[in-house]
């Protein structure tokens, strides 16, 4: 009974509560975010409300493009409303959403887009390039407009009364009324008004925005064209700049072209001067100069195109020095004077003149003579008298410096003596010192040269000087001249003195002699420098891995190496040292003899005596035997002659053995090696002094042929063979000395052929050798 009643009560209560919520709170149950689409100006603040009635549980939070927004920006007003305040919103487009943390429920969202106004407008009234100033023809404005990079905008410049001045699709716009004949043009009107207002309208695909109004004084935004006809007149004192304009305010900008990165100097000019003077300019320097001007209240014009100007030489702005070298008095009574100067910038284009005048007893005796000079030196002739030289700029005669040359043999002048040069620890540095006479001296000029062409000099008040930066290993000639105020005294000079010493670059070593236990090593040196010096030579020699050395003084050029091993190969090299430099020769090889050459000599002398003894005994016996036989002497004129034809030529070769190499067992030295290359001397085959013709090969020099043939003719005891191109036998006229024709180079090539053509005479049984000679 109770159950159905209870059920009915519960259903009724539910119905009532549902009706309550629908009937009385129906509009608040739905969650939402408003306003919906937002289009706001960039950098403005935005407030968004989230209606949260549908979700009474959980926390409300916001996201911007999916990222959580700091809670501090969100504020819960009452149970059903939460407000988000965003300040300085700059994103061009964003989605803001409202969430409930209860079941991570999305309650609603909004899209915010921003726009920006054109800002920072600047406008200029100006003129066409090269056009005349006056009423401006051009009006140009530019501005800034922040936009999404995908967005484009169309801009219009409008007057106060929304009249269009110009249109553009970029953030600047020019109104050009040059072509308009209408004098009532907007620019004309603008120029003559006191204040003028414009605004810039930007139209994008989302809408239209206007800039804030821009108010200006037209005269103050007028920009004239730069001045024209810039002229620069350089003088030795300054640069005068001139130009043409009709505006009162101008500025001159200038800088040295050598220092383009330095901030340029700017000069303000005086009203209506249309010229300016740049003072304190350096000598012979290029300056780039430009000018700009402005109307009374207007903007500065652009700088005029730069002009380059070279300043002139001014003596007071440089540190120059003039000096001279005087040669000895020549036979014609003249002295050559070489004038030279330094300190004048190489950029100077000035030409120079030397004005010279002779003095006698301190008075000018003659008119001046003028010589035009090169850029840094001048050569003039003077006689024995005292002279003064003035260096001047040719163009304007401005005096630069002067120097004098004393009279020959003037005893009243200051002098120096006892000049001494010393080497410095460092190479390329020479120290000079000198002593002074009692006469007053204000300073000294010390000059030096290594080639007699190029001189260097400096002034000092001390009696010594150090010359730096000299070429190494070069002899320098140094001169010291005392000065007393303007007067130069008598010079003194040193002999050429080396700026530094070094060892010679090349050492050539030879082994002159090699015995069994000693050898003589000799060397000589070669250097491209005159300033060469050797303190010590060290001779290194080595055999079978054992190294020895011996030192000798730098003045020696050879040494005997002692205590060597007989029949051993040695290598030897020589090292030269001086100060801290060394130089090593290349290695030379030699071999000691097996025996003491004196022993060999003694043995060979004994053997020779023995041989002579035996020979003379044999000869005596032979003479005795001949006398005993007393046979008639055969006459070669009566001997029969037969031709020995070529086929037997090889046989002839067979008689004569090629010479064996006698040098094989000799000591190999430089000398002997060289000897191998020398022309062969006749080679003896044992006792038989019979060189063979077949030993003459095609590649041997011609001389050998004649040498050997001569010897052969003179010393053959038993018989002789003669090759001759002449058909007549020398034996038919005994008074003629047989000759052998020298074969020419081409002959040698045809030797085989020639030989076959030649007749070969053989004389037999010739006892009387003296007849042949
Ligand atoms: C939220 O902003 C407050 C003050 O503006 C700041 O102190 C806090 O660190 C910020 N919280 C986060 C998570 O950035
Ligand atoms: C909550 O605040 C909003 C806005 O101020 C207001 O419209 C609404 O009536 C308030 N709701 C209640 C229940 O106070
Ligand atoms: C936000 O804008 C206000 C004025 O609109 C300005 O004073 C403030 O500096 C801006 N803040 C930032 C962070 O740009
Ligand atoms: C406006 O533009 C000028 C030059 O274009 C610039 O010097 C100035 O800082 C700009 N001002 C602002 C507020 O952007
Ligand atoms: C203005 O117009 C003239 C004639 O049409 C033209 O020669 C000149 O270049 C223009 N100036 C500018 C800045 O556009
Ligand atoms: C700008 O103007 C051009 C033609 O004058 C037009 O085609 C274009 O749609 C315009 N752009 C906007 C954003 O209004
Ligand atoms: C060099 O400049 C000085 C100072 O400016 C001036 O007085 C002098 O006349 C100039 N020298 C020459 C030779 O013009
Ligand atoms: C302007 O004039 C004054 C004297 O009238 C003169 O001292 C000054 O050097 C001049 N300035 C220039 C840049 O010429
Ligand atoms: C100086 O001006 C000349 C034009 O006269 C120009 O060619 C040169 O580049 C300028 N020098 C420097 C360093 O700007
Ligand atoms: C110097 O020159 C003048 C003319 O220029 C001449 O009359 C005079 O004789 C000359 N004097 C000497 C010493 O040469
Ligand atoms: C020694 O050698 C060094 C380096 O090569 C050099 O600077 C120095 O002048 C030399 N000294 C001498 C006395 O030659
Ligand atoms: C030269 O001067 C040196 C000192 O500088 C001195 O010792 C020497 O005696 C002088 N010689 C002569 C000859 O005066």
Image (cartoon, rainbow, N blue to C red):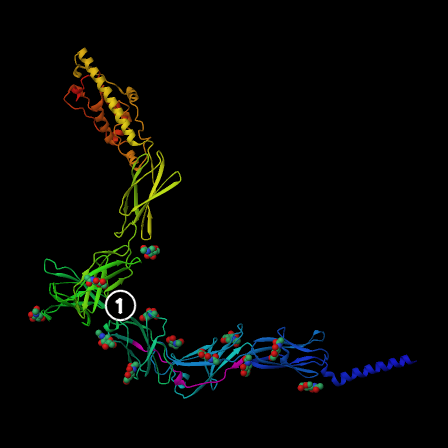
- Is 101 left, or right, of 549 in this rendering? right
Is 218 magenta? The answer is yes
Residue 691, image x, y percentages:
26, 25
197 vs 705, nearest the viewer: 705
The reply to whether the magenta stretch includes residue 384 is no
Quadrant holding ligand 1? bottom right
Instruction: Single out the residue that lies furthest toward the right.
Output: 1
Residue indicated by mark 1:
345
Indicate left or right for 492 with 310 as reference: left
- 60 in relation to 368, above or below: below
Position above or below: 364 against 141: above
Return the x and y of residue 760 as percentages of the image width and height.
23, 20
From what the image shows, is residue 433 above or below residue 134?
Answer: above
In the rendered picture of this protein, how many numbered marks are placed on residues? Answer: 1
The x and y percentages for residue 327 are 16, 60
Residue 507 lies in quadrant: top left
* Residue 341, quarter of the rendered image: bottom left
Ligand 7 contact, mark 1 (Cβ < 8 Å): no
Q: Nearer the viewer, residue 103 or 501?
A: 501
Residue 321 image position (x, y, % from top left): 23, 68
Label 1, residues with CA under 10 Å away: few <14, some 14-19, many ≥20: some
Q: Give the range drawn in magenta.
A: 208-229
């Amino acid at each position: 009974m109770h159950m159905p009643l209870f059920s009915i009560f519960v259903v009724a209560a539910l119905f009532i509560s549902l009706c309550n919520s629908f009937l009385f709170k129906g509009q608040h149950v739905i969650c939402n975010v408003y306003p919906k689409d937002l289009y706001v100006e960039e950098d403005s603040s935005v407030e968004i409300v989230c209606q949260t009635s549908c979700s009474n549980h959980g926390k409300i939070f916001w996201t911007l493009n999916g990222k959580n927004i700091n809670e501090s920006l969100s504020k819960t007003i009452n149970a059903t409303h939460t407000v988000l305040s965003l300040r300085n919103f700059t994103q061009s487009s964003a989605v803001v959403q409202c969430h409930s943390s209860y079941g991570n429920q999305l309650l609603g969202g909004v899209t915010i887009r921003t726009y920006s106004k054109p800002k920072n407008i600047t406008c200029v009234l100006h003129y066409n390039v090269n056009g005349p100033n006056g009423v401006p023809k051009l009006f140009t404005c530019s501005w800034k407009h922040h936009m999404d990079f995908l967005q484009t905008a169309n801009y219009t410049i409008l007057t106060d009364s929304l009249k269009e001045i110009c249109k553009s699709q970029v953030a600047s716009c020019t109104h050009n009324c040059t072509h308009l004949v209408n004098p009532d043009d907007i620019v004309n009107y603008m120029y003559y008004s006191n204040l003028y207002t414009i605004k810039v309208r930007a139209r994008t695909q989302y809408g239209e925005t206007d800039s804030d109004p821009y108010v200006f004084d037209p005269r103050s935004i007028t920009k004239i064209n730069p001045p024209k006809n810039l002229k620069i007149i350089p003088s030795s004192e300054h640069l005068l700049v001139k130009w043409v304009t009709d505006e009162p305010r101008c500025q001159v900008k200038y800088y040295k072209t050598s220092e383009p990165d330095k901030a340029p100097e700017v000069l303000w000019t005086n009203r209506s001067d249309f010229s300016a003077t740049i003072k304190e300019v350096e000598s012979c320097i290029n300056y780039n100069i430009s000018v700009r001007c402005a109307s009374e209240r207007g903007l500065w014009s652009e700088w005029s195109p730069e002009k380059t100007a070279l300043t002139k030489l001014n003596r007071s702005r440089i540190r120059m020095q003039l000096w001279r070298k005087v040669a000895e008095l020549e036979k014609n009574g003249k002295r050559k004077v070489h004038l030279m100067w330094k300190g004048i910038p190489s950029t100077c284009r000035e030409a120079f003149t030397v004005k010279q005048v002779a003095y006698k007893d301190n008075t000018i005796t003659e008119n001046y003579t003028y010589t035009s000079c090169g850029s840094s030196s001048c050569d003039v002739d003077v006689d024995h008298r005292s002279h003064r030289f003035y260096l001047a700029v040719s163009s304007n005669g401005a005096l630069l410096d002067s120097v004098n040359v004393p009279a020959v043999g003037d005893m009243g002048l200051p002098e120096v003596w006892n000049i001494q040069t010393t080497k410095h620890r460092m190479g390329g540095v020479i120290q000079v010192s000198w002593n002074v006479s009692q006469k007053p001296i204000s300073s000294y000029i010390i000059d030096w040269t290594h080639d007699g062409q190029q001189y260097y000099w400096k002034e000092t008040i001390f009696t010594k000087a150090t010359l730096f930066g000299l070429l190494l290993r070069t002899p320098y000639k140094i001169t010291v001249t005392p000065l007393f105020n303007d007067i130069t005294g008598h010079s003194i000079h040193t002999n050429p003195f080396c700026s530094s010493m070094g060892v010679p670059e090349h050492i050539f070593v030879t082994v002159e002699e090699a015995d069994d236990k000693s050898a003589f090593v000799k060397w000589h040196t070669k250097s491209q420098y005159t300033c060469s010096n050797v303190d010590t030579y060290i001779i290194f020699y080595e055999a079978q891995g054992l190294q020895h050395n011996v030192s000798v003084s730098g003045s020696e050029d050879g040494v005997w190496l002692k205590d060597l091993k007989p029949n051993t190969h040695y290598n030897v090299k020589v090292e030269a040292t001086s100060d801290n430099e060394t130089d090593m020769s290349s290695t030379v090889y030699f071999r000691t003899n097996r025996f003491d050459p004196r022993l060999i000599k003694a043995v060979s002398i004994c053997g020779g005596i023995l041989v002579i003894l035996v020979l003379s005994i044999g000869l005596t016996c032979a003479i005795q035997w001949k006398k005993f036989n007393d046979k008639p002497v055969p006459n070669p004129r009566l001997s029969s002659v037969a031709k020995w034809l070529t086929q037997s030529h090889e046989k002839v070769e067979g008689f004569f053995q090629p010479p064996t190499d006698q040098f094989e067992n000799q000591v190999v030295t430089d000398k002997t090696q060289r000897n191998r290359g020398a022309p062969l001397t006749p080679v003896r085959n044992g006792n038989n002094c019979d060189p063979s013709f077949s030993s003459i090969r095609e590649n041997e020099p011609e001389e050998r042929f004649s040498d050997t043939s001569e010897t052969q003719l003179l010393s053959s005891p038993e018989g002789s063979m003669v090759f001759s191109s002449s058909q007549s036998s020398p034996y038919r006229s005994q008074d003629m000395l047989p000759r052998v024709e020298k074969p020419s180079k081409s002959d040698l090539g045809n030797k085989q052929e020639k030989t076959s053509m030649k007749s070969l005479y053989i004389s037999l049984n010739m006892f009387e050798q003296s007849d042949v000679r």
